[in-house]
Image: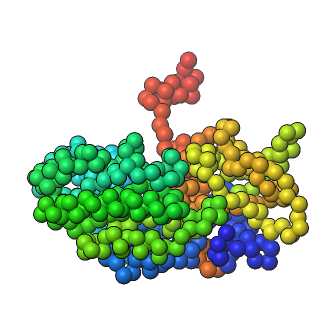
Amino acid sequence: MTETFSYRAGVLCAEDIPLERIAAEVGTPFYCYSTAQLKKNYRDFADAFADQKAMICYAVKANANQAVIRTFAECGAGADITSVGEMERALAAGIAPEKIVFSGVGKKRDEIAAALAKGIYQIDVESIPELHLISKVAGELKKPAPIALRVNPDVDPHTLAKIATGEKETKFGIELAQLDEAMKLATSLPNLQFKGFAMHIGSQLTDYKPFRLAYKRLENLIQHWTEQGIAITSINIGGGVGIPYLGEKIPPLAEYAAIVREIFSPFGCRIILEPGRYLVGNAGVLVSRVIYAKKAVAKKFLIIDAGMNDLVRPAMYDAYHDIVPVRQPAANTPRDSWDVVGPVCETSDLFDENYQLPDLAQDDLVAIQFAGAYGSAMSSTYNGRPLIPEVLVSGNQYAVVRRRISVAEQIGWESLPPWMESEDRRRGSGIR
């Protein structure tokens, strides 16, 4: 729990607003974000790198809500995008194209063309075929393509396997063994403007040692190619700084910034950082209502109205989120082991197993903590469930920044083929 999500008079509040009030007015489940926490997180990150030539590009994939992106845009952030859809979201929220970096292993021709047409800062290239395609598209547009080569340093980030990106077995980046070939192309193919290197080894790192190891490998590459007469003006070191889902002690950001300064400041390049989870993770909660407290013979199940379609992280890769009652229990309240589950028809619809909670009853509210990153952004309509609201709080006011998308509205996105529509008309007129 953070200062912006705290108990006041026995009720969990987002800044100055009781979550009970929002639940009564908006319905459950819903995501709730704190403006104060978003701004604090950005300020902390920016302050840590204030003495370096740093450009902080928010990783839009973590939470793509317009109000969230706009909050960071007003703080001065750029954007790290992985699709043209994210680019459009970033631009619509007020981020300037010259502060946007395009990452991702599968950029299509039309996406490359759109990014170049908008004049984004750079495209991080992740394969040799991508170099050829960017050169071709840039030639067709008669517009040079600013690029950096994303290097795969083959470093184990010691995080969850499914969010690790810096080992050579993953799909990300160009392997060191292929870098000579990639560099020859990057500096010789027409219409390419080589700016430097990029690297991102994974997400949710709670120890900075893997960063140091990866950055030292990047340092060696920069030294080598600088000695070959290649000008390097930009170094993208990615994101990945973790947050304390399990109460881990995260080293101060100053220690991370010191590693970056020590290794890269001698080159005088612009340093690009791409925090996502660090900026939004602890700034959001998922509020849900108890449907049933089911006491089976072997287990006790707390069945809530949020499901894995709303927050998939626990089902996808066993991620942990703290769960607290919205009504603060007394200090001496007994606790018992509950499996906290959702209504989705999957055994994996499990938020936590044998979780210690006081006895809760139907209609009680719970808040799933640290749900601002990769929560709503990864949600779906599985089991015919509506997309849930997102709420932004600022002091004593709040606004719904994404309304609930009803099932009826979702059906309206679809259409029947002509032969089915004809059959419907015949049935309506009595024709069989």
Instruction: Pick whichever, 249 or 62, lies toward us.
Output: 249
Residue 208 screen position, x and y as percent: 47, 64
At horizontal 70% and vertical 50% (from top left) the residue drawn is: 352
Q: Is residue 152 visible?
A: yes
Figure check: 194 above or below 382 = below
159 relative position to 154: left or right: right
Q: How many marks?
A: 0
Instruction: Pick whichever, 20 or 167, lies toward us.
Output: 167
328 relative position to 25: left or right: right
Quarter assignment of residue 48: bottom left
Quarter assignment of residue 14: bottom right
At horizontal 74% and vertical 67% (from top left) the residue drawn is: 20
Q: Is residue 73 visible?
A: no
Instruction: Pick whichever, 48 or 228, lies toward us.
Output: 228
Residue 39 screen position, x and y as percent: 51, 76
Figure check: 37 above or below 401 = below
Which quarter shows the N terminus?
bottom right
Residue 356 screen position, x and y as percent: 79, 56
Quarter assignment of residue 75: bottom left
374 relative position to 318: left or right: left
Residue 120 screen position, x and y as percent: 27, 63
